[in-house]
Amino acid sequence: MAILAIAFIFAFLFYLALTAGSGNLLFWSIEELVFGLVFAYLAAILSVRLFKAAGVKPSAKMLSPKRWLLFFVYLIGPFFLELTKANIDVAKRVVTKKIKPGIVKISPGLKTDFGTTLLANSITLTPGTLTVDINKKKELFVHWIWVESKHPKIEQVCSSFPKWIRRITE
Amino acid sequence: MIFVIYTLLTIGLLFQGLGVLALHRFPDVYTRLHGATKCTTFGSIFIYLAIILYGIQLVLEGQPQFGVLSVHTLIVLALLLATNPTGAHAIARSAYRSGVKPKNAVVDDLKGEMK
């Protein structure tokens, strides 16, 4: 029930952000507010069902504003820096065609599903590395465009990401 | 302000172009995904930043209805950062499961895992 309420509140806030400026009741028109409530409720019910079907256990940990702040710091700090460096690197590889691809296994040892998802997405967004698959032990299989060593240390593949994600989610 | 916007647009277009070039030059589906999803993401980020700045500039010039443009673009940027890697995972995973092997691979740890 609490999960439903939280999902509803976030869906409604999202709808408000999308329709800001539609009227003069503060920023919204009355029609948009009513439809927002209806759609937010539908979206909340559907997402709770999806969570259940996928066997995901949502935790209240991520509601704390400190974790959100850390997440934004991570996004615009170390993550964006790596993104820039790696983009220039891959841009060079596109032009010179110098590649040495391969699929390597890394075991980040993150405890939560959300943390593992966040790491897999960060790795995929960073150019040169692409998460292909995951196994039961939460080990990631990463396609690497320039394999530095066949059994790499985790820092070689994704620099300081696991450290930051551990701080955000655990 | 307008020069900053043009600079951001130029960087964005440059990376979008490199993404297209990567599709032609790389040998197989995984390496092409690197080019297609990554250069496009970075290109899109800069183009969206240009749109956000343009919206802010129009608001400062006394057209407040364009503030919505900046807010919407910010939302699209957040959604792109969440959905782009998800799509890339789906393509790469389904490609591997349907038997597409990485070309010229020096190491393939996933081979032993799939039985």
Image (cartoon, coloured by chain):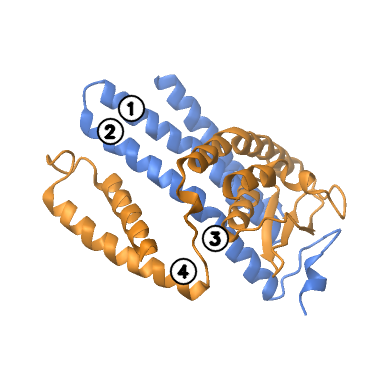
Chain colours: A orange, B blue
Is B17 left or right of A87, judged from the image as shown? Answer: left
Q: Callout 3 environment at 10 Å: few (<14), some (14 to 19), or many (20+)?
A: few
**Marks 3 and 4: same chain?**
no
Marks 2/3: CA distance?
Answer: 30 Å
- Res A21 → quadrant: top left
Q: Going from the N terminus, do you reach mark 1 or mark 3 first?
A: 1
Name above or below for residue B50 compared with residue A164.
above
- From what the image shows, is residue B10 above or below residue A128? above
Kindly state the secondary structure of the residue where label 2 is placed: helix
Q: Quadrant of residue A133?
A: bottom right
> Which residue matches tag 3?
B87
User: Is residue B20 visible to us here?
Assistant: no
Alpha-carbon span between mark 4 and mark 2: 35 Å
The span from disc 3 to disc 4 (Cα, nearest Å) is: 19 Å
Disc 1 versus disc 4: distance between alpha carbons?
38 Å
Residue B67 numbered mark, or none: 2
Reading the image, the residue beneath label 1 is B56
- Give me the disc on residue A51: 4
